[in-house]
Image: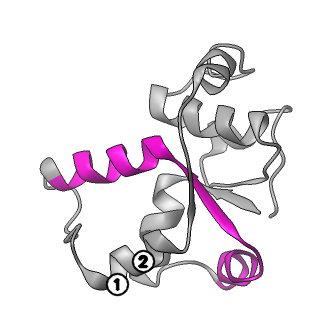
Amino acid sequence: MLNLDTHILIDFLRGRLSDEEHRVVLGDDLAISGIVLWEIAKLVQLRRLTLNLRDPRFLQVLGSLRVIPVDLEVAQMSCQLDFRSDPADEIIAATSIVHDLPLVTRDERIRGSKRLRFPL
């Protein structure tokens, strides 16, 4: 199972993944942190993302993902990372660590972490 960050999920929905990202994402079960849903809703609210959150395709993709809640263990881990970023990214990374899931991200700050695994 792989954990997708927000931008990877958005680009997956838009069909904008690189060939390698697409191969990796389609080759495994997928998960997201619950905070990703908040980030997407916020981006839509701020008009930085055009996406109908009730679109059947979005709901179908969402239904195929495991949504991992932000629990106390994830919250605590987000304060023990070896990098600093915005809180949502820290929660996404902490979710990968707590649940032992490789993280699919392009974020170089996160990719510099020695505590995370990355499938590409």
Label 1: state its secondary structure: helix
Query: Can the viewer see residue 112 in this picture?
Result: no
User: Magenta stretch?
Assistant: 19-44
As measured in the structure, the alpha-carbon distance from the residue carrying label 2 to the one carrying label 1 is 8 Å
Q: Is residue 79 above or below residue 7?
A: above
Where residue 26 appears, as percent x and y from the top left, is 69, 83
Where residue 65 appears, as percent x and y from the top left, is 56, 67
Dot 2 and dot 1 residues touching (CB under 8 Å): yes
What residue do we see at 77% from left, 36% from top?
97
Q: Which residue is mark 2?
A: 13
Q: Which residue is mark 1?
A: 57
Task: Indicate yes or no whether the magenta region holds residue 34.
Answer: yes
Task: Indicate yes or no whether the magenta region holds residue 28.
Answer: yes
Of residue 103 and residue 95, the one placed in the foreground of this image is: 95
Where residue 94 appears, as percent x and y from the top left, is 67, 32
112 sits left or right of 63 in the view: right
Q: Is residue 104 above or below residue 110?
A: below
